Amino acid sequence: MLTNIAAYHFATIDDPPALAGRIREWATTGSLLGTVLVAPEGVNIFLAGAAEAIESFLTRLRAVPGLADVQAKYSHSRAQPFGRLKVKVKREIISFRKGEQADPLRGRAPAVAPAELARWIKQGADDAGRPVVLLDTRNREEVDYGTFAGALTLPIDNFTELPEALAPHRAALEESTVVGFCTGGIRCEKAVLWMRAQGMDNALQLDGGILGYFEQMGGFGYEGGCFVFDERVALDPALQPQVDGEAPVETAPVPA
């Protein structure tokens, strides 16, 4: 059984190419496969391999200044879900192109914990009695595999399209508590920062994204699986692969 991790962390990286080189060396030493993105704003990691090699990699990563608090989300698979190791240097670890209006290095947007969100879903409102709108910040292909029941989904193919797609809904959301969510938290973290910069003080992010919610709350309030952009295709609320074949395939870099 292989261990799979998804992790991201926003931190100032002074020399992304140098860190990318070290990450490639650590992953190669441990025979890990997957995708790692490094940018001046942080790291975005999707790797699979032996459990011991994964933990050794995380230990080395957390020794890097600014990355001590990297938190990984774990799942498991019988087969290697990645075809090769890709370590790339990017301008952003998730492209949104909104500059200071969505800069996690300037401060994190307020978040709601999975258990708190589950309570809100169960009671039909937040603790102040306001209606809760779950906003899916992922693209339409991902949404087709599953999302929270009743979530507001947007007809987008790329994350950069979210601001325009959200515009027609702004007025209708004014009296609600809006909880943005995505696979692992990286996109909703940027999206909610931008939303609050646009005056949407009622917007929160789901801490840890869907995968973090699955870890803590299972599938309560969620319908279907979570698309993960590798050979597993999607994970169910028990974090089990929807497809767990034997031959790895080439995949696109995985948003979180």
Image (cartoon, grey):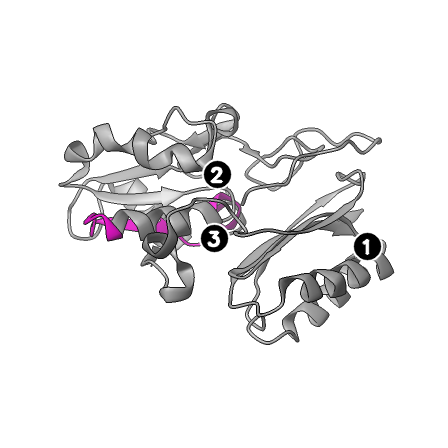
Residue 50 circle label: 1
Residue 112 circle label: none
- Separation of residues labelled 2 and 1 (CA atoms): 27 Å
Few, some or many residues within 10 Å of mark 1 (<14, 14–19, 20+): some
Q: Which of label 2 and label 1 is nearer to you?
A: 1
The image position of residue 24, as x and y in percent, is 77, 58
Identify the secondary structure beneath mark 2. loop
**Observer-nearest residue: 116 or 161?**
161
Q: Which residues are magenta?
A: 197-213
Q: Is residue 180 magenta?
A: no
Q: Residue at x 80, y 42 (%)?
A: 84
Quarter of the image with the C terminus in it = top right
Q: Please tell me whether residue 110 is drawn above or below residue 64 in the rendered image.
A: above
**Residue corresponding to mark 2:** 219
**Observer-nearest residue: 217 or 102?**
102
**Residue corresponding to mark 3:** 208
Q: Residue at x 18, y 49 (%)?
A: 199
